[in-house]
């Protein structure tokens, strides 16, 4: 696989029409939606049988479960963002390497001492213009540490946040999320 160019640079040059359903364009749109905490855009970019796999190998299957998962995660880390520094494309697979960061704020309060940053690698599988799998490879110890501190105070994660928790996420079979109307 060879490194790819930045998609924004190509869009500025008017080369984006043929790329609209490419794995690169879809994965880059997914990253932009994450960085805007735009759950509805994320859902629009997911295949109905979308699969999210966290860095521990825990999986969540289904677009609607991930709607609740992302919504809960953005409540827990409201300024979550990913800075992509390098990309590789091989057909339907698009790999991104960079940094994920945010502030653990389960109560909504963005405290500087709850800020974390960690290297991340992401793998997007794209089919027919939709993300069928989003896989995260990251050392989430900085966030796990913040969560352990909070848990020692007796506060639990909400089910939505737990569905996307890449630090202690439950196994696919144990996920219980509220229905989304």
Image: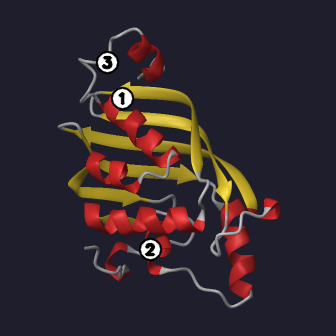
Q: Residue 27 location in percent, x, y?
A: 38, 37
**SS type, badge 1:** helix
Q: Earlier in the sequence, mark 2 or mark 3?
A: 3
- The tag on residue 160 is 2
| Residue drawn at the location 70% of the way across and 69% of the way down | 109
Q: Nearer the viewer, residue 162 or 79?
A: 79
Q: Quadrant of the N terminus?
A: top left
Q: Is residue 161 above or below residue 139?
A: below
Residue for badge 1? 24
Quadrant of the image occupied by residue 83: top right
Q: How many marks?
A: 3
Q: CA distance from mark 2 to mark 3?
A: 35 Å
Q: Residue 79 location in percent, x, y?
A: 62, 54
Dot 1 alpha-carbon crowd within 10 angstroms: few under 14, some 14 to 19, many 20 or more: many
**SS type, badge 3:** loop
Q: Is residue 31 above or below residue 170?
A: above
| Residue drawn at the location 57% of the way across and 43% of the way down | 82
Badge 3 vs badge 1, beta-carbon distance below 8 Å: no
Residue for badge 3? 16
Q: Earlier in the sequence, mark 3 or mark 1?
A: 3
């Amino acid at each position: 696989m060879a490194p790819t160019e930045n998609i924004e640079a190509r869009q500025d040059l008017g080369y984006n029409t043929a790329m609209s359903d490419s794995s690169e364009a879809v994965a880059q749109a997914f990253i932009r939606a994450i960085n805007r905490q735009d759950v509805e855009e994320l859902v629009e970019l997911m295949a109905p049988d979308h699969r999210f796999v966290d860095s521990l190998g825990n999986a969540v299957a289904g677009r609607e479960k991930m709607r609740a998962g992302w919504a809960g995660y953005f409540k827990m880390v409201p300024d979550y963002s990913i800075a992509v520094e390098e990309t590789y494309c091989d057909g339907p697979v698009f790999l991104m390497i960079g940094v994920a960061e945010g502030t653990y704020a389960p109560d909504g309060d963005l405290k500087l001492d709850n800020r974390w940053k960690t290297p991340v690698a992401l793998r997007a599988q794209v089919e027919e213009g939709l993300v069928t799998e989003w896989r995260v490879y990251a050392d989430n110890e900085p966030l796990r540490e913040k969560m352990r501190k909070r848990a020692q105070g007796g506060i639990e994660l909400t089910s939505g946040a737990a569905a996307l928790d890449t630090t202690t996420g439950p196994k696919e079979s144990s996920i219980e999320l509220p229905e989304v109307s």
